Image: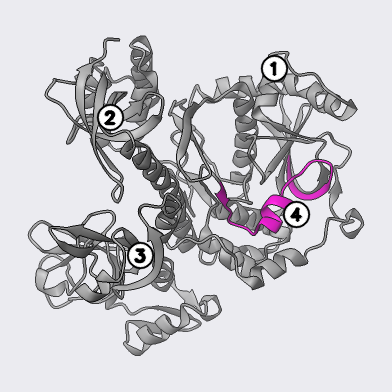
Amino acid sequence: MKSLLIRLTLGLYDQDITSEERPKVDDWLAKSYVIKDGLQYRFHSKYRAGEITLAQNGTAYLNSIGLNVKDLFIDDGDLGDAKNGDLVIAKRLLAKRGTPSAKVVEVVGRAQTYSVAFVSYKENRRSLLDIRTLHPAGVIMDEKELGSYDVGTVFKVDNLTSTIMEVLGNLDDPKVDEKIVLAQYNKHDQFTDEVIALAKSFEEVDASFYPERKDLRALPFCTIDPVTAKDFDDAICWDEKNHILYVAIADVSEYVKPFGPIDAEAMYRGFSIYLPHRSIPMLPRQLSETLCSLQPHVDRLSYVFELHLDRDTLEVSHSDVYEAIIHSKRRFNYEEIDEYFEGRLQPKNDAEKEVLAYINPLRKVTDRLREKRLKVGFDFRSDEIEMKLDQAGEIISTTVSEETPSHSLIEDCMLLANKAAASMYERGVFRIHEPPSQTKIQSLYNELAGIGIFVEPQENMKETISFIQKKAREMNIESDVDTLIIQAQRRARYSPDNHGHFGLGFEKYTHFTSPIRRYSDLIVHRLIKAIKANDTEEGSYVLRNIESLTIAVSEKERESADVEFRFMDRKYARWAAKHVGKKFKARIEATDPHLIAKLNDEIVGATLHVRSQIPVMLFDDVEVIIEEVDIATTKISTTVVQKIAK
């Protein structure tokens, strides 16, 4: 919905209105919220679309979307039934003096369009509660109807109509966890028959059908990915003699055309979602895991950056990007490459020998690239938890994944390609990361002072953060402090205009290297292909709704990450519920406004709500006892038993 509102704010061509959006546009046209201005539909100047922010006194403000304008004041009598975070259309009150104001005329989307509710039984009565807040779900259901469902029955709710859409299962069943987190964002796994049929219709790659593509099948490309990966977006090849890095990316745009059924579904999903036990792909598996995936020993269509590096400076002296055909010689996982670096892996055949011959020379290059990059950018350590589940959906184990030399090698290859892609246009899809606000920075300084790190501001933010990290290293809390620094920063996002990437220290940056799992990258491929072909019409077509697209993709990214985190939280809660009354080690992660700890024992990473009669400080190691677990909200309540000496 937000995408439609932004496009109507900026101007929406008739042909860009989807069949799902058409009834809304016609309705708003009839109500005069929207006018037709030449070939475009747009909001009448009297109306604005935006999000509601409630104030404490019952009044509110409208944060207009798609326009760089001041917020509009909304009096409590002009709010209607709009709630905090809701998407609304408001009419500007031009006759009023003072603060620019408006009146809500229609709520078009709730802050949470979809939610999950469950049947609760307390004090001898049943009720239907929101699974996040434990407040009444807002769905009208009488006692008799509620009585027909078991306690713990879980429903998907449409908040705009306050109706039940689907029965998901029961809280007693671990398998319902996935359904819950997907329902909250209206995500789904299955593709329509039309999408599957189209994905299956593509034939295997026959090089003779693509005479215009550059034939790179003789080059010894390889892929290096996690051991569980199936969607291989990127392959690399290093020409040591000529100092050329080839970064081959799956050519998804060859198969997924704009406004086709696969494209519409990919745009809706935005990103692949990776859960501990399986993935929910952005593209049908016939493409994501087969035809687009750069599998070994088969011909694959790719979009390749050829990057010529200066031997002394490692600057890209020349680059080109083109459509190609490659034939990956080997699929490696990260562990195998690390074993090779340690001298524990030997090539088994001529193909492996050819690939591995350039891996060590390439590592020397990427190590230098990383050293150079970190002079202007940052290296933040944050723990990424890998969780293993059993057949029943319960936790078997958790481990903290570590970045190894193989990860660094691939990362810096991809960063080079992404930078090269961003340099090709002035307006498009950029991955931006703006510097932190002074308010956030001052709050960070105060937190650090509480643990004995007194910040002496340096000449610039880079030097100041390096100073903080040095002090944290000396105290052996580098990862913990890096987490605080990350929390103090703005979130990286997509933008049609370049604002640089603070964290990486890059003047221009985008995402080019993962079109199988990120819709943003697919758009970048389409744009660069139009630029390369001097096709200004196609380039303009790609950019036409770029503002709304980058906002939508940024939101989809947040949703996908939230699904992944919330799923793991549900699994942690189920594990904790079986260990009530037991003691575990944890580390205090936050002290204000509440005590929060992270489990750091046989299971790691669970968020714990903490009570303590013992004075504790940030990053103290403690022993806690699990007192109570709420499976619905995933809240794990604990009490500190003792502090653990470091």
User: Would residue 312 be seen by someone viewing this image from the given angle?
Assistant: no
Q: Position of residue 427 (x, y in %)?
A: 54, 54
- Name the one closer to the observer, 406 or 87: 406
Residue nearest the viewer, comparing 226 with 255: 226
Q: Which residues are magenta?
A: 278-305
Quadrant of the rendering where the C terminus is positioned: top left
The residue under label 3 is 155
* In-image side of 365 versus 548 (left or right): right
User: Does 44 sit above or below residue 403?
Assistant: below
From the viewer's perspective, is the residue at label 2 or at label 4 nearer?
2
Upstream in sequence: badge 1 or badge 2:
1
Q: Which mark is residue 341?
A: 1
Residue 261: quadrant of the picture:
bottom right
Sequence-first disc among 2 and 3: 3
Report the residue marked by disc 2: 597
Q: Quadrant of residue 361?
A: top right
Residue 96, numbered circle: none
Labelled pair 4, 3 in contact (Cβ < 8 Å): no
Q: Kindly identify the residue that appears in the image at 50 percent across and 61 percent down.
A: 188
Q: Is residue 362 left or right of residue 190?
A: right
The front one of 114 and 270 is 114
Q: Secondary structure at mark 4?
A: helix
- Mark 2 or 3: in front is 3
Q: Which residue is mark 4?
A: 291
Taking 75 as reference, is 135 left or right? right
Q: For the residues marked 2 and 4, what is the alpha-carbon distance in whole angstroms?
A: 45 Å
Q: Amino acid at mark 1?
A: Phe
Query: SS at mark 3?
Result: strand
Q: x, y (%) of residue 297?
A: 84, 42
Alpha carbon distance from label 1 to label 2: 37 Å
